[in-house]
Amino acid sequence: MLDTGYWMHTRQIASSIQYLVSSIQHPVMLSILIPIFNFDIRPLVADLHGQCEALGIGYEIVCFDDDSTAEFKALNKAIWKMTNVIYREMPQNLGRSAIRNALGKAARFENLLFMDCDSKVVSPDYIKKYLEVIKLGGNSKLPPNSSDALKLGGNSKLPPNSGGVIYGGRSYADLPPQDNSLFFHWHYGKHREQTTASKRNRSPYHSFMTNNFLVPKAIFLDILFDETLRQYGHEDTLFGMELAQRNVPIWHIDNPLEHIGLEPVDEFLRKTEQGIENLASLAKAGSLIETKLLSTFFMIKKLGLAVYIKWIFLVFKGIITKQLKSVSPSLFFFDFYKLGMILIKFGH
């Protein structure tokens, strides 16, 4: 009886042959890259696979599991049976940045489409729209102020003949979750993260996130994610700033993925604190990173108000946290919560 290793080797040979044939038949080749951690990605991969097959394009869907629990590994292993799908399990947790770097390096094609595993495809033309952008030259030779760029919601300031990054956006369900503990995450995402391309293009680098973006492989390998950031938070901010420093344009379009991995408010606040810790560490190390939170912090510090605001935060932290867990959380209080946390991280 033939073992699993034989079949995997046979699949690798068949995949290599298919790659050679596809590269001749299809001028646009797409590598869809998905880092996995404790999430069932079967529906996401099935949707992407179906769209790619229907379009008849050359593609691969590469999924690396970053040491999830045995339960999720058992579920997700099923995807390797699908054509053009590669599934691998990391022997140990690499972290959010390193796993994405590993995916980018393993990709075979020039166009890399990164997405988060807790995403949901909401448009039947999701892949098609990215292909239209590529064919128009959205990440290579799209002329500035062109009618095609404006039609697709692109960045009208994109310089001619330049490589660039395409960001599709993030959306949230129209209705709030039935689980009250998930409400704050949905509320924050709906009002802060779900924005139109026209609005995001006003500040393209600050609006960049890693949940849904297309990048030429050469540009990605030149920058990569900072692997010193192992815990959650601001690897996307730093990557966006690296793009800005290299004058690599970011072009925003309306082609979102829905974020379905909502987390309980306690976990959401814990990850917020991790992100602020990363932000403070980057700023202390002299990184040229820019965020509204950092700008507010430095302004308060300059005015000599840091000690007083930190004291107010510590006194009212319990009340603020309770309010964020209520059925009508205030994003103003959440902003103040983040300000208080960065004051603590900086030791003021």
Image: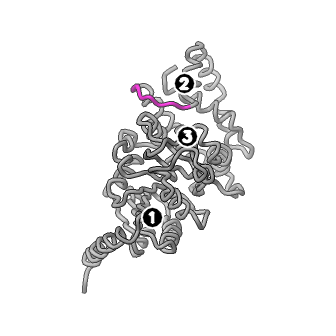
**Mark 2–mark 3 CB contact (< 8 Å):** no
Answer above or below: position of 52 versus 171.
Answer: below
What is the residue that sits farthest to the bottom in this orientation?
1
**Where, quadrant-wise, is the N terminus in this rendering?**
bottom left
User: Residue 244: which disc?
Assistant: none
The residue pinned by badge 2 equals: 343
Please tell me whether mark 2 or mark 3 is closer to you in this view: 3
The residue pinned by badge 1 equals: 72
Which residues lie in the magenta part?
285-291
User: Residue 157: which disc?
Assistant: 3
Categorize mark 2 by other alpha carbons within 10 Å: few (<14), some (14-19), many (20+): many
Disc nearer the start of the sequence (2/3) = 3
Q: Is residue 265 left or right of residue 79?
A: right
Please tell me whether mark 1 or mark 3 is closer to you in this view: 3
How is this picture coloured?
one colour
What is the residue that sits farthest to the top in this orientation?
304
